[in-house]
Image: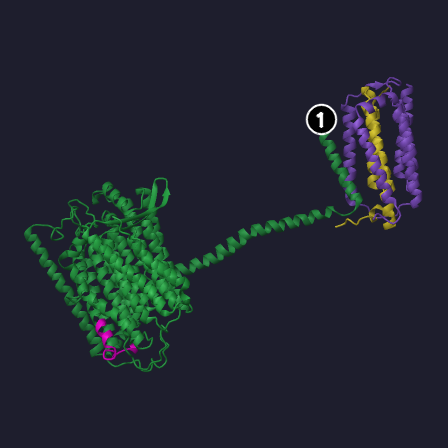
Chain colours: A purple, B green, C yellow
Amino acid sequence: MLHLILFVIFAGICAGGALNMLLQKHPINSALSLIVVMVSLAMLYMLLGAEFVAAIQIIVYAGAIMVLFVFVIMLLNAGEDEQTKGSRVAMLFGFPSLLVAAGVLVYTLVLRGGNTASLAIGQFHGTAENISDLLFKEFILPFEVTSVLILIAIMGAVLLARKGGTE
Amino acid sequence: MTANLWIIPLLPALGAAVNGLLGKRFSKTTVNAIALGSTGLSFLWALRTAWAFLAGGSQPLLSEYGAWLRIGDFSVPYALYVDQLSMVMLLVVTGVGFLIHIYSAGYMAHEGGYYRFFSYLNLFMFFMLTLVLANNYLLMFVGWEGVGLASYLLIGFYFLRDSAANAGKKAFITNRVGDFGFLIAMFLLIKHFGSLQYSEVFSTVASRFPAPESHPGILTAIAILMMVGAAGKSAQIPLYVWLPDAMEGPTPVSALIHAATMVTAGVYMVARSNAIFSRAPEALAVVAVIGALTAIFAATIGMTQTDIKRVLAYSTVSQLGYMFLAAGVAAYSAGVFHLMTHAFFKALLFLGAGSVIHAIGGELDMRNMGGLRKKIPVTFWVMTIATFTIAGFPPLAGFFSKDEILWQVFSSPHGHWALWLVGIVTAFLTSFYMFRLWFMTFFGEYRGAKASRDAHGHGGHDAHGHGEPHESPWVMLAPLVVLAVLSIIGGWVGVGNRFEHFLAPVMQPVATAEAPAGMHAVNGEPTSTPINKSEEGEGHEKQLEMTLMVTSVVVAFAGFGLAWFLYYKRRDLPERITDKLGTVYSTVLNKYYIDELYYNAIIYPLVQGSTKVLWRGVDAGIIDGTVNNAAIGAKHASDNVRHMQSGNIRSYAGWVATGAALVLVYMIWMGTR
Amino acid sequence: MVPLSFYLVLSAFLFACGVCGFLIKRNIISLFMSIELMLNAVNLTFVAYAAFWQRLSGHIFVFFVMVVAAAEAAVGLAIIIAIFRTRETLNVDRVNLLKL
């Protein structure tokens, strides 16, 4: 019961934040809404027993990435969007396909998925210990590769953002 | 025994190659030496071969030089073969050819392209000798085509003249139409007899179709198709139209190719294939009818022409008709006999005409000649001998051969009195127009005084710029004299069926009760007369033969008489007669408008069809169109697809979303199936 | 007790919002944020399934997705800054030099 109430609350905040992100005109408002979405998602992770993931969601996503976004918005002094002509294709093809995809997904997952089982709080734990055990034994290779990836990303970012262009 | 027959055709080939490739830098003497030398040596070797042949008991000589084609069971060798028939042809070709080479050295002395002329002439000799010496139809066909090529090159020798170039094309193309028939005949031979070699084909034919009553359809087909080829090469109806135009070439060419040798290739082929023709009586009838019709048809046209070479050209067509008439009544040896004598006197006539033309500075129209008897006496005398020969006066060569043909036409089981009638009328016409030519050229007043001022005659041959007709140099006259002598004595080899007996082993008999005339028993022993009946029957035949002989002599005299009357005594008459005849005369004068008929009925529709349908429609429209339109279509398609790349990120996003949705749906659909 | 499908529907909804935002928004940075939203939706799916199947591989995957998202955000924003420097605009419709 509690599980359901908590879920509804946080899911509602999540969905509301997402919608708000869409509807806002100023990017900074969108960014702040997105932060709200991130945090509520972290709560949902907690409900699902993924403690570690929730923690790093807050730290990395909400704490680092979104901050980065906010910094950039402030740096570039992004204002309200001016009105420009959109793309006909996007409207003509994009939205219908989106609706179709979403509809199909929902239909399949809900009505045909047979996922009516439930999870109780506390039944499953994704502790740091368990995750690290997996990470450094089975998934050691992707781990190392992603570290290289981060390194490259850092270099790329530094290079791109240097004053004087990208020569 | 190795006869080394390869020397005979190869020497002229070498001469042609050397003169053709290097002749431009040679002096006239060197070119002469090479050309005449190669032909002369070839003639000497032919003589030696003939001597070896006769000394060796008349056994056929065969020289094999390996296989040319080998396809499964079918093979064709390079092989040269001499038997009686090819020996006769060989001697005629090399002998007359050599004489004409000598003549040309004088006649063409002032012409440009001297080396080219002799190169082509030697090339022609090579191909003709290949044709004559081949032991299979395919090698003969090589020679056949080759002489057609040489004829084209030589007719169009003055290629800068439109009429000459067109005449060359006409000759070659008309020949090709005939060659198509010959090719189909060869294909049929391969299919039904499995070989193209004479020995194999003829023995197979003999064993499979022993009796002529069996009327085998396949042999008739082959024979008629061969006749089509022969009609093209030997200028018979309906493919004779190229020969009169071929007079555009230099006169020695007309003498060699279109009188003595190339045009006789068709007769040679029919004579060589006598085993096939004798077993197909319908085909023989076709040959005889074509020959007879051509003979009289060409003779009527020859009566009206005023160009001296044209008259001789039509005369050639007519005489070839005689040869085919003989072949058509299965009197092949008579046809070959006439071929030989015709080579002598027709070559003499042409060369003599060339001498006349040379004498008066290039004039060809007989109306502008006359009275040349005193001015060019040697030419006059040789031309006289030739004219009397062709008219059939005894004891000259033409009498013997023509008479033999007429007799065979009348008496042979394949012959018919109607054909004989056509033959005798043609003999009368021949005598008439030849003597007309003789009188117009050599008698009366010289009418060419004004014409020779500007020597721009039809041929544009030599530009001496002489005012008075003068005799030709001895290099030209010597061959004329030799040919004249041959015209006189040439017929004497045929007296008393000697020629027939000589060729007997080649002309295989068809041994049944209905033995066609002119055939002898296979063991080579000659029976004394063609038709072996009882003693009294034999006497009766002799009487008939005598009667016919006398008739033909009378007819020859009649022609002489009429020509004398019209062209010597009463010169004004011909014009009044032709005026009276009006349209009839002009139709004959214009060659019965056959050329125009061919053009409108065949050539023009073909060319138009080819241009409009095949060129513009199919080639440019469909084939090019398909390729071009494929490219244009691709360009248009890509032009339209290009708009996807708009640079607009949101449209890209839209496309991505669409694609992703499609993939998603597809995967779900696959998963839930 | 919350059935799995609830989480999945929420995830789908978030994803749809992300795509929507990507199609609608005109500011490049807003575009980017929509992409982040999409990634998060996917993360939710992974974690939900991990919980229901009692396996930790889902969490690991989320871990890696986050790493990649971080790297991508960094580089992407650097690009945006570079574009801003040259084009003086953050309007995505103006960045159309690839137009044929």
Residue B148 image offset from top left, x and y in percent: 35, 58
Q: Nearer the viewer, residue B406 or A163?
A: A163
Based on the picture, tell me whether residue B209 belongs to the magenta stretch.
no
**Magenta span:** B367-383
At horizontal 82% and vertical 22% (from top left) the residue drawn is A134
> Is residue B371 within the magenta segment?
yes
Q: Is residue B525 left or right of residue B387?
A: left
Q: Determine the image quadrant of residue A106.
A: top right
Q: Amino acid at mark 1?
A: Gly
Residue B158 appears anywhere in the view: yes
Q: Name the residue carrying label 1.
A: B671
Q: Secondary structure at mark 1?
A: helix
Relative height, residue B41 to residue B308 (above, below): above
- Depth order, front residue of B470/B168: B470
Looking at this view, is B109 or A44 the one in front?
A: B109
**Badge 1, how many Cα within 10 Å: few under 14, some, many 20+?**
few
Q: Looking at the picture, how far across and down is residue B395, in whole percent? A: 15, 66
Q: Does residue B249 appear in this view?
A: no
Question: Which residue: 84% across, 36% down?
Answer: A151
At 34% across and 42% down in the image, what residue appears? Answer: B74
